[in-house]
Amino acid sequence: MFPALLMAALAAAPVAMPPVVDTHIDAPSLQVREWKDLLNTTDRDFDAPAATKGGLKVGFMSIYTSPTQDEQGTANASAHQQIDAMEALAYRAPYRFVVLRSARDYDPNDKRIALTFGMENAAPIGDRLDLLKVFRDRGVSYITLAHSANNRLADSSYAVGRKWNGLSPFGKQVVDSMNRLGIMVDVSHVSDQAALQAIALSRAPVIASHSAFRHFTPGFERNVSDEIAKAIAAKGGVVQVTFGTQFVNRKDALGLRDYFIELKKFKDGVVADLAAGRKPPKTEAEFDREWDAAHPYSPATVREVADHIVYGIGLIGADHIGIGSDFDGVGEALPTDLRTVADYPNLANELRRRGISDADIAKVMGGNLLRVWRQVDQLRSE
């Protein structure tokens, strides 16, 4: 066969799927809000039939709590409820799912879909270091230090204004304790200063659990800069590329940045109205609906996600890139051919079409994260 024909044949052939490890699936908060039978086909991004079809081996279920829950003191209870919900799924179908408490529980020969947890926003621990071990023992394998607002630990990339100029003194204690407990430090969502400080402070590899590359979205701090990506790689960690159009598409990324700016103005206006005895002109839910109607998502495809992955491989090497989809977390803002956990093969095939080797595709689809997860666990001292 002529070389050109051989290359065309290889590009057309589907990739034999390696084990997929996805570090960010938002099924738990949806399941608590509205239960669905995830053992069967649903309209969710994650369910058992789709996960089996897509080759998902380990799904990090995102235990998300909001800044509002943090303010109201309900984040801890919400986190436990979300873990309970996913445990219930696994316990109801032990032939289909298994819950992993740590990297040492992972068995590559187990045919079941493994569920473990990533805590998105450290709000559930409040100001108590001892709660880190409680959640570690329940299976929380990474913690995103902050989310969409500055918190007790760190500044957020979305926040208008900075509270700590990076990590707080308590945040530095948390990073140290996470290292001792074998919990991966996650710098997605935090400000650049917080990310660089956490990476420098950590004695273990650090991850960005669901971030894309700012190279494609200048001005959008939520995505990792080249500097931060290189620092993560130098520490032995991984950047887990996310799929949402708000992260991979420049227009949508800047729209999301502007949303948080305008939301802050809206909330400040509500506070002023209430203080003056006036009724606010609209609720936050109405604000969100109006914003979404005025800012429709751009169409995106697997090619844009692959752009970020290929760029990352060129920047920091194939040993430091993975995937953190944000399935069930961004609504309809997903590429047309990466809609559910059944669609991972579309990404693998696109990477192969770009000339990425099968060995490197296996690293990106899960091998790199498994390595880092094990390394962080092995470094734990309690």
Image (cartoon, rainbow, N blue to C red):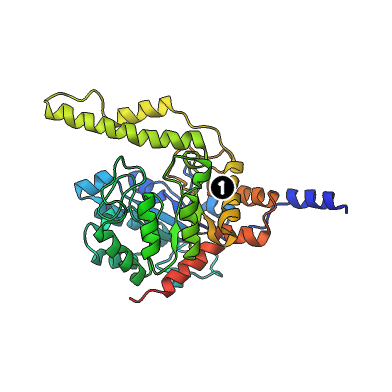
Depicted 19 relative to depicted 254: above or below? below
Question: Which amino acid, mark 1?
Answer: His
Q: Which of 110 and 216 is in front in this view?
A: 216
Depicted 215 relative to depicted 101: above or below? above
Q: What x and y, as percent, mark residue 126?
A: 23, 56
Q: Residue at horizontal 46%, vertical 66%?
A: 373
> Image check: 332 left or right of 203?
right
Depicted 16 relative to depicted 104: above or below? above
Depicted 254 relative to depicted 191: above or below? above
Q: Residue at horizontal 59%, vertical 43%?
A: 302
> Image check: 334 left or right of 346?
left
Q: Residue at horizontal 35%, vertical 54%?
A: 194
Q: Residue at horizontal 39%, vertical 50%?
A: 192
Q: What x and y, as percent, mark residue 166?
A: 32, 53
Per the image, the residue denoted by label 1 is: 308
Mark 1, Cα crowd under 10 Å, few <14 / some 14-19 / many 20+, is many
Q: What x and y, as percent, mark residue 161?
A: 29, 42
Q: What x and y, as percent, mark residue 59?
A: 47, 57
